[in-house]
Image: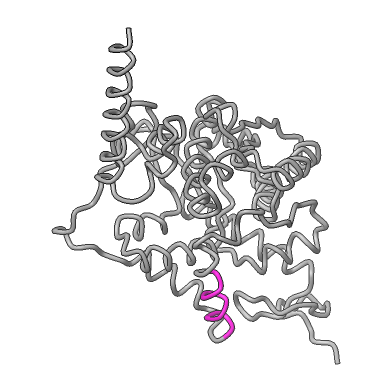
Amino acid sequence: MPVPCGSSCGRNAFMRRPKTGDTLCKECFFLAFETEIHNTIQQEQLFRPGEKVAIAASGGKDSTVLAHVMNLLNKRYNYGLDLVLLSIDEGITGYRDDSLKTVAQNRDDYGMPLRVLSYQELYGWTMDRIVAEIGRSNNCTFCGVFRRQALDRGARLMEVDCVATGHNADDIAETVIMNILRGDTARLRRCCDIKTGSKEADTIPRVKPLKYSYEKEIVMYAHFKKLVYFSTECVFAPNAYRGHARAFLKDLEKVRPSAIMDIIHAGEQLQIKGTVKKPVRGVCGRCGFVSSQQPCKACVLLEGLNRGLPKLGIGKKSKGERMVALQDQQLREKAHLVKNDF
């Protein structure tokens, strides 16, 4: 027997929302999903009229839905935003090269300018080369660090006021779990912020309009809206630490669907003792981009690759310093031997 839509619109329901359990028809689900994102944007004051906003576009479901909804809400509620697409090409054959075709389709569908920046262009390395150098372990560390900085570099080149990313509720809950398991108190509180960075601190802000949107609902929205998105997983992702947190979260969600939102709210309410040492965010003395250490992690990792010491930025800083000192000593000894030969 058909179940009526819970919004009393007179239509039959076609789904039960994973987030709330409400039975809704397709049209009411679309409206509820879009309205929740609009309310998040308004309540958190994520944008101001006249701002130029870069949408971090990967071609996946999250960034595609974000681009679609931002384009729709910008027109529906007259936000007055100038929306552009910013994509990062990590140089992963069989993955990113294909997903960028989807991003190009989004560009054409929504009429937004697109800028693509590559790791090769920014760092002189591709992820394929990096993985060939370091192997399959720790490769996500390189990619994540470089990608975060690449977005900052792209945002500065495009002269945008802020960057909107497609992080959803599941992503944030996974990050909370990961930071708890790693004992990373600094990132544990910051990962729940819906807006990070500020112009006052000379950093381009990042915002997460999909912070309270469940991944399941994003997939359903993209599917029933017939949006074009790329769904293949990164070829290097199976080795990522995040995968274990994701599997744990999915098991929790089966038992308690509200677990995702509960974890996010717990992270938001977290308070850290004043005696706990926390890193101070500033700018890297080498590259000039945001960092909580000197030099920044991206510069350390890049130095390691260029020196032939790919493990330089992995592990404790003191270990990396010893590696550099040892290599410098070996180079000096080699130069001394060459000099004596003449």
**Residue positioned most to the top:** 342
The C terminus, quarter of image? top left
Q: Where 328 sits versus 190, above or below?
A: above
Specify whether residue 334 is painted magenta. Answer: no
- The residue drawn where x is 69% and y is 52% is 60
Q: Position of residue 147 (x, y in %)?
A: 53, 41
The N terminus, quarter of image? bottom right
- The residue drawn where x is 53% and y is 31% is 155
The quarter of the displayed image where residue 102 is located:
top right
User: Which region of the structure is painted magenta?
Assistant: 246-254
The quarter of the displayed image where residue 309 is located:
top left
Q: Position of residue 297 (x, y in %)?
A: 38, 40
* Depth order, front residue of 237/63: 237
**Residue positioned most to the front:** 341
Q: Position of residue 110 (x, y in %)?
A: 76, 40
Q: Main secondary structure of the magenta part?
A: helix
